[in-house]
Amino acid sequence: MRSAIARALRGTLAAVSLLAFISLFLALEARVTSPAVLGGLAALGTATLLAAAGRSGVQRLLGRNEWGPENDGETTADGDEWLDESADDTPWTDRADRAGDGSETDWPLARLEPALDDAWNRWSDAALTLGLAALGIGSLVLLATYPGEEPPLGLLLLVAFGFNGALVTLPFVFKEG
């Protein structure tokens, strides 16, 4: 029972971390958010990432910890054995995508997935779906109650992002296994 609660809490924290960092990214791109809100989103994302994935997750996000098959002691001699694929079964595009010398990109949002991978579970999918739906509903409410004549286009994009994201992640909540 205790391990089930721990898994649920860890998965929920992983989804909250992902939502916080995505919100931080969108707020930075919009350039209309106060520095206090940006700092709060960064602190929330880092704290929940630390709670869900530990120090290694934060190090992966910051790009200070190399990961991947080349650093885990595994080898990928002919093809991608770590994916149980031979070189003949692996499409050439997949091999080309994974063939770069650099293990990961320098873009921090791209490093979120590997940092949260160990903590991600079905609870994460549920929390992410609910969080994206809340983002869409909240943005729709702000759009409907906007006092000016022309509401910001960013609110309309957040409505679309929230609802579409929730619909895309919904099947993962009910996925078996």
Image (spheres, rainbow, N blue to C red):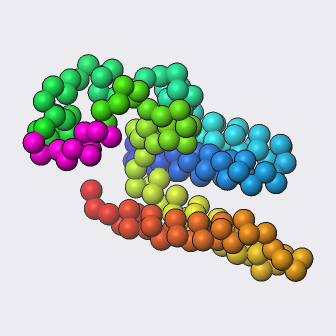
Closer to the camera in the image, 167 or 91? 91
Residue 75 point in image, percent of width and height: 20, 23
The magenta span reads 88-97
* 164 relative position to 33: left or right: left
Q: Residue at x 63, y 42 (%)?
A: 45
In the rendered image, residue 37, in percent from the top left (x then y), is placed at 79, 47
x%, y% of residue 38?
A: 76, 44
Which residue is at a point 55% across and 37% down the rendered structure image?
107
Q: x, y percentage for residue 33?
A: 81, 52
Asked whether residue 53 appears in the rendered view, the answer is no
Task: Place residue 87 in its image quadrant.
Answer: top left
Say left or right for 81 vs 63: left
Q: In what quadrant of the picture does the C terminus appear?
A: bottom left
Q: How many marks?
A: 0
- In the displayed structure, would residue 138 be above or below residue 6? below
Q: Nearer the viewer, residue 17 or 168?
A: 168
- Residue 105 or 6: which is nearer the viewer? 105
Judged left or right of residue 108, residue 175 is left
Q: Is residue 175 magenta?
A: no
Q: Is residue 98 left or right of residue 38?
A: left
Name which residue lies at 45% across and 67% down: 168
Residue 92 highlighted magenta (yes or no): yes
User: Among all residues in the image, which is located at the extreme right?
Assistant: 148
Instruction: Establish if 103 lies above or below 146.
Output: above
Instruction: Specify whether residue 151 is in view.
Output: yes
Q: What type of secondary structure mainly makes up the magenta span?
A: helix
